[in-house]
Amino acid sequence: MSRPVSDSVFYGGKPEWKNTWLAMATLEVILKEKIDGLGAEADVVKVKRGFARNFLLPQDRAYEATPANLRHLEQLKEARAKREAEELADAENSATKLKKLRLSAELSIGQGGKAFGSITTSDIADLVNDKTKLGIDRHQLVLDKPIKTLGSYDIPVKLHPDVDATVTIRVKAPEGEESEESED
């Protein structure tokens, strides 16, 4: 008895059994914790089998989505709601601290008002963390381009998807430079 042949063989396509070998196997998992780019705890996501087998499951960051594990989904959803409420409260507390904060930075200015260097988001984040110990990351600061002129600036800070704050920074010239310019 001969084996049946797919119509796709006659039209120059690949046989149906070859397509199953090329398809990437996926697996549904329940996340135990928030993973950037994938989801938060209690999310049921479909990932490639290798990613689940080699990373998520061995590092205890996910469960396989079996019927037994799906029953525990409510507990994970409660933990997620609690964590998100704590993050929102922390962000609101940080926002009130940042609104009161006034920072000062020095920027060397040469003849003709040209700046030597600039004030970047990492400089501002370091100043904020030195004063408040909030743990602000430079990626949370919204600054289009580095500051290269003297003056006062309000820098937006993205603390949480629902909470924004601003930090006021005053950029001034070092005191020794002003006296040097007047002597020349």
Image (cartoon, helix red, strand yellow):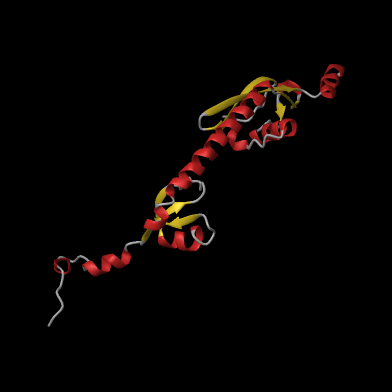
Q: Position of residue 92 (x, y in %)?
A: 59, 28
**Is residue 64 found left or right of 3 in the rendered image?**
right
Residue 39 showing in the rendered view? no
Q: Position of residue 137 (x, y in %)?
A: 63, 37
Position above or below: 44 against 53: above
Quarter of the rendering occupied by the C terminus:
top right
Q: Residue furthest right?
A: 183
Q: Nearer the viewer, residue 158 or 155?
A: 158
**Is residue 174 found left or right of 95 in the rendered image?**
right
Picture quadrant where residue 155 is located: top right
Position above or below: 147 against 36: above
Quarter of the rendering occupied by the N terminus:
bottom left
Residue 85 showing in the rendered view? yes
| Identity of the residue drawn at 51% across and 32% down | 161
| Identity of the residue drawn at 57% across and 36% down | 86
Picture quadrant where residue 174 is located: top right
**Is residue 49 found left or right of 86 in the rendered image?**
left
Picture quadrant where residue 132 is located: top right
